[in-house]
Structure formats: structure tokens, C-alpha cells
Amino acid sequence: MLFSFHSLRSLITALFILATATHIAAQSSSATILKAIKQAKSGDAKAQFKLGVMYENGQGVLKDEAEAVQWYRKAAEQGNAHAQYNLGVMYQNGQGIAKDEAEAVRWFRKAAEQGLPQAQFKLGVMYENGRGVTKDDAEAVRWYLKAAEQGHAMAQNNVGVAYENGQGIAKDEAEAVRWLRKAAEQGLPQAQNNLDATNATGEAVPKKDAAERPSRVTNAAVAAIIVFAIVVWAWKRTHSSK
């Protein structure tokens, strides 16, 4: 026999536990969905937004982008900034509703005016590219700056590029480097590439940057020497005690 009676019994027990856990999880998920639907229908904007996300991504319900749009709209009309932003994205991409970039801009603006950084960034993109609105580089930079000041990495990168090219704002290489560095420090590859390109031209690298680099190298070298000295001391002490 490939399995002993004990092994077979253990396998059956494990399968039973798994089935029970799956059933409980399904019941819990169903309860969560029913609760969200009930709250959403009662007019709770947060629940309406949550239900929209569930329908958009097929989380616990069948994926239905048109249904997602309906719930996003209900929440957005009550002033939920995240719903306003998501509704704007749906209009921008034509998901669950006919593509309409002017409507996308309208909803992005509502969310941006409430301080949502991703909406501020999107609005900047729309102005920079003239999508759903008249192209306006200065207005694009204004919205990029609002998002950048809240730590939005792509907005910081775009502000840096705008300063570097004098696009929508007076050219300022030092400011370009400052904003590109902020985005690069968040791990944004585009910003690091732009920063490297700017540094390669020898333009606008702040003095403190040039001063800090040797210091960082020196500190690293000193630390390495100290570690090496400790290792050597420990080795000598070990061998001298034998």
C-alpha cells in the first residue's frame, strides 16, 4: 500500500480542515459584500466607492466596469475624492462608459481641488498634453507642483523636467536637480535617468552635492577600516588564547 491507514486519515483530516476554512472564508467574503451593498444603497459614499472598486476589479463579485462606474458616480457626486478620481480614470480610458476626456478632466479637477495628489498629477498631464482641455504648460506645472509638494514621485519628476526645459515655468537648472533628486530618492527610474543626464552636462549640480559625495565616500572608507581592524583584533585574540 502506498499509504498507511494513519496517513490516509491524516490526509482526509487536512482536506476537511481546508474545505471548512474555504467555506468560512467564502461566508465571510459574502457577508462583507452584502454589508457593502447594504451600506452603499443606504447612501454611504465610502461604501459606494468600495463597491465600485470591487466591481472594477472583480473582487468578490463578477467584474463589471459599467456597474463600477455607477457606484463611483454615486460616491463622486457626494464629494468622495477617490471616487471622483476613479470616475475620471474610467472616462479617460473608456472603461465601463464611453471615453470622454473632457469629463475625465472635470472629475480629476474636482478631486484635485480636494487635495488628492494623484488627481492633481493627472490634471497636470491632461493640461500638458491638451487632452480634454486646452494645452497649457503653465497650468500643468501648477498642478504638478501641488502633487509634487505632497510627495508624488512622477509629479516631482515632471516638475524637474519642466524647470530643466523652461516649459511652463522659468528655466532653473538648480530647481530641476532639486525636484529630480526628490523623485529619484523615491526610486523612480525616469527621475534617476533625468538626474544622471542633467549631471552629465555639468549643469546645475548644487555645490552641496559635490561636497557631500567625497564625505560619503570617506565615511564609508573609514567604516570599512574600523570593521577590518575589529576583525583582525578578534582573530588575533582568538588565536593567542589557544
Image: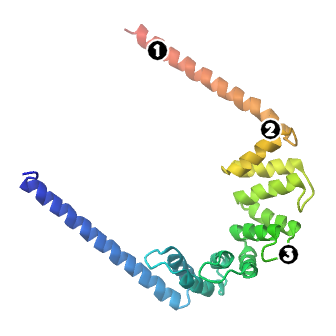
**Foreground: disc 3 or disc 1:** 3
Residue 110 higher or lower than 13, as above or below: below
Q: 233 left or right of 34? A: right
As rendered, which of 6 and 3 lies closer to the eye?
3
- Give the SS element for disc 2: helix
Q: Give coordinates of residue 120: x percent, y percent.
A: 74, 69
Tell me the element at label 3.
loop
Residue 194 placement, left or right of 66: right
User: Does residue 149 appear in this view?
Assistant: no
Tell me how far mark 3 sits from mark 1, CA to CA.
72 Å
Q: Residues within 10 Å of mark 2 (few under 14, many from 20)?
A: few
Q: Which tag, 1 or 2, sits closer to the chain's start?
A: 2
Query: Is residue 30 in view?
Result: yes
Q: CA distance from mark 3 to mark 2?
A: 39 Å
The residue that appears at 10% across and 53% down in the rendered structure is 3
Number of the label disc, if any, that sits on residue 235: 1
Residue type, numbered disc 3: Thr
Residue 197 versus residue 229 in the image, above or below: below
On the image, the x and y values in percent for residue 206 come to 85, 41
Task: Report if the CB atoms under discs 3 and 1 are less than 8 Å apart.
Answer: no
Q: How many marks?
A: 3
Q: Which residue is rendered at x = 87% and y = 47% of the image?
A: 174
Foreground mark, 3 or 2, reads 3
Residue plotted at (82% across, 67% down): 128
Quadrant location of the C terminus?
top left
Residue 134 - label: 3
What amino acid does circle 2 point to? Asp
* Residue picked out by circle 2: 209
Based on the displayed image, in which of its 4 quarters is residue 65 positioned?
Answer: bottom right
